[in-house]
Image (cartoon, helix red, strand yellow):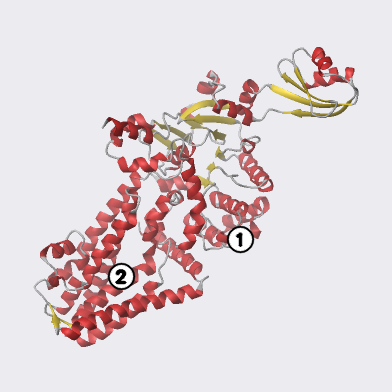
């Protein structure tokens, strides 16, 4: 009996005491390792699942209670799954969605023109879904998610499996949406997706928010290291350089005359380094590495950093009252009573816990084949 | 209210239309499915013929009367795949996580599921069953009046609605169990018993087919009313009521399932 209860308890934890509000027009990056609860949060916000505790509100609507009303104000993309009709040309899928969302012919045409411009959708319209490449499918799915000009857009891994060219295209499009004032919640493993789109980042791990604040601030506070890579034309040793910059670390590169100088940007600037080096040697080539947010998040994942939000983030910046979107599901603790009779549900919910990632991947992969076989 | 209903219907027609266009991509499949439907129904008729070559009546029912019940069942069961075959996708949609998208659209998830696919074998089933029904009607003793025709049509529509409700219930098991087909197909197998006069079964099965899984109302009771036969002929007139109750139960169960739906994926 004890064993059973314990098992249920762990199985049910998908998100636990997530407290999150999003301002209108805000672009939020929602990142975390596999199974951290990212998709579960999106499913709560879209009304796909009902919170077992706490409450969720989107634009004044309780999503799971009023799914259809909520559907009109949101756009959703699950990058691992398509919502296109498998045997139909893209144009037909879009036309079906047009009818479901009661989009007027003028608005519809305007949106198609726009998607053609930014996503090169025109070429895909006559193509049957099953013949689309992954990148083409994702572009078409983006069009599906945004066709009805939703105020709030949830994008779960919108660049997963895409090649660089398509990724860039998707990112450009996200920036454009952002500029137009669409509220965006972006879940991704590829942190290049969020730079330039999101100014706020929420890091979630094990069903809990471990950081919520400005993206620039995270980089400022936790990614202060800069690296200047130099190719020098004058013979000089690493020790000579190190002596010139006591606050920096100097490592010689693979080739002769190559050096990397790493320093804390609060102690030194790239400009000062370059000026200093120029006094010692002829500088042939320079490359400066900005820290990538990947590094920060990787360190958070690895447990190296324990970031806590600054008081400004917690109180001032995001007052829950003014938010169109907020989720306060208190996952398991409130749910334990329910779990006692909801054993069947435990399986489905299991996908929300760490380690269940492969299940999702597999489901996404078999999707087309299964759909085709029907 | 009416506007919403019209919108639902229009969207349903649009979804089905799109599915048909998708299927038409494979013209060969289309004809094979229709052919398969006709063959299946004809085989059933051959079986009945073999039985009646040995015995003149079965539990008091003559061969044409049996064909009438049998073909009425065939029509009811054949019409459904044409416009509501999508219900059989529910389990797969749920377990592959594709049901998620349906919940993010401003259109009833149940109607989206129902209109998601089409079984052209139903066309064959229906055509073959109609032919049998026509033959049976010509060989049984029914006093046709405009009233009989009207009530008959209402009973037919009710029987179709009833069968669909039972299929919705059977497939809704997907919200609770991992292998929903076992349940839905069991329901369907029980339903097959409704092809024959229920007098040939024991009390337990008769009760089952009349109450818990009232498949007897999808063919036997309406046919018995039409033929004015058996002590329970009047029961056939209860078909619309049974259908309404079954739909109440189906919607309740489907919505309960929706509430406990937890989605797959992380």
In the rendered image, the vertical position of residue B152 relative to residue A357, given as above or below: below
Determine the secondary structure under disc 1.
Answer: loop
For mark 2, does the 10 Å Cα neighbourhood hold few (<14), some (14 to 19), or many (20 or more) residues? many
Q: Is residue A91 left or right of residue B231?
A: right
Could one spot residue B140 in this view of the protein?
Answer: no
Which of these two is toward me, A53 or A237?
A: A237
Residue A55 lies, in percent from the top left, at 39, 34
Which of these two is toward me, A94 or B223?
A: B223
Residue B257 lies, in percent from the top left, at 32, 48
Residue identified by numbered label 1: A125
Chain letter of the residue carrying label 2 = B
Could one spot residue B180 in this view of the protein?
Answer: yes
Q: Is residue A348 left or right of residue A246?
A: left
Determine the secondary structure under disc 2.
Answer: helix
Residue A251 lies, in percent from the top left, at 77, 22
Which of these two is toward me, A98 or B191?
A: B191
Specify the quadrant that holds the C terminus of chain A.
bottom left
Give residue B157's quadrant in the image.
Answer: bottom left
Count up the numbered dots.
Answer: 2
Residue identified by numbered label 2: B77
Q: Is residue B21 left or right of residue B78?
A: right
């Amino acid at each position: 009996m004890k064993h059973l209860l314990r098992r249920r308890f762990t199985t049910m934890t998908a998100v636990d005491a997530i407290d999150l509000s999003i301002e209108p027009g805000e672009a939020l990056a929602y990142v975390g390792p596999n199974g951290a609860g990212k998709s579960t949060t999106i499913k709560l916000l879209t009304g796909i699942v009902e919170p077992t505790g706490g409450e969720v509100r989107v634009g004044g609507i309780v999503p799971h209670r009023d799914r259809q009303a909520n559907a009109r104000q949101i756009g959703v993309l699950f990058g691992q799954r398509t919502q296109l009709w498998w045997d139909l040309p893209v144009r037909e899928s879009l036309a079906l969605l047009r009818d479901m969302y009661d989009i007027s012919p003028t608005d519809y045409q305007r949106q198609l023109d726009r998607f053609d411009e930014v996503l090169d959708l025109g070429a895909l319209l006559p193509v049957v879904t099953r013949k689309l490449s992954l990148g083409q499918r994702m572009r078409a799915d983006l069009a599906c998610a945004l066709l009805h000009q939703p105020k709030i857009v949830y994008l779960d891994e919108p660049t997963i499996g895409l090649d660089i060219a398509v990724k860039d295209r998707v990112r450009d499009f996200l920036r454009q949406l952002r500029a137009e004032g669409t509220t965006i919640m972006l879940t991704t493993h590829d942190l290049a997706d969020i730079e330039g789109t999101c100014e706020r980042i929420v890091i979630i791990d094990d069903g809990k928010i471990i950081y919520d604040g400005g993206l620039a601030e995270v980089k400022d506070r936790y990614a202060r290291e800069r690296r200047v890579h130099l190719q020098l034309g004058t013979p000089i040793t690493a020790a000579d350089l190190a002596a010139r910059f006591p606050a920096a670390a100097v490592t010689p590169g693979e080739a002769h005359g190559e050096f990397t100088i790493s320093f804390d940007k609060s102690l030194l600037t790239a400009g000062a380094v370059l000026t200093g080096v120029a006094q010692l040697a002829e500088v042939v080539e320079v490359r400066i590495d900005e820290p990538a947010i990947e590094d920060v998040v990787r360190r958070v994942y690895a447990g190296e950093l324990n970031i806590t939000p600054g008081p400004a983030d917690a109180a001032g910046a995001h007052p829950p009252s003014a938010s169109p979107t907020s989720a306060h599901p208190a996952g398991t603790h409130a749910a334990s009573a329910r779990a006692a009779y909801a054993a069947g549900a435990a399986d489905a919910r299991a996908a929300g816990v760490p380690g269940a990632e492969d299940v999702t991947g597999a489901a996404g992969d078999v999707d087309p084949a299964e759909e085709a076989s029907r | 209210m009416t506007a919403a209903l019209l919108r639902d219907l229009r969207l349903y027609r649009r979804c089905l239309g799109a599915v048909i266009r998708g299927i038409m991509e494979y013209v060969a499949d289309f004809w094979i499915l229709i052919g398969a439907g006709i063959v299946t129904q004809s085989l059933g008729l051959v079986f009945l013929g073999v039985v009646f070559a040995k015995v003149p009546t079965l539990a008091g029912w003559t061969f044409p009367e049996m064909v009438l019940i049998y073909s009425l069942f065939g029509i009811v069961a054949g019409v459904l795949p044409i416009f509501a075959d999508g219900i059989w996708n529910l389990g797969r949609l749920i377990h592959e996580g594709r049901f998620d998208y349906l919940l993010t659209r401003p259109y009833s998830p149940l109607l989206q599921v129902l209109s998601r696919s089409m079984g052209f074998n139903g066309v064959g089933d229906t055509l073959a069953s109609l032919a049998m029904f026509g033959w049976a009607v010509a060989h049984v003793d029914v006093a046709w009046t405009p009233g009989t025709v009207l009530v008959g049509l209402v009973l037919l529509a009710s029987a179709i609605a009833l069968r669909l409700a039972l299929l919705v219930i059977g497939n809704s098991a997907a919200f609770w169990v991992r292998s929903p087909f076992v349940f839905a197909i069991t329901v369907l197998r029980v339903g097959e018993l409704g092809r024959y006069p229920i007098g040939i079964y024991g009390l337990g099965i008769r009760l089952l087919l009349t109450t818990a899984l009232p498949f007897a109302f999808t063919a036997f009771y309406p046919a018995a009313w039409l033929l004015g036969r058996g002590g329970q002929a009047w029961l056939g007139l209860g078909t619309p009521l049974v259908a309404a109750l079954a739909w109440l139960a189906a919607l309740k169960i489907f919505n309960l399932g929706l509430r406990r739906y937890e989605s797959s994926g992380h």
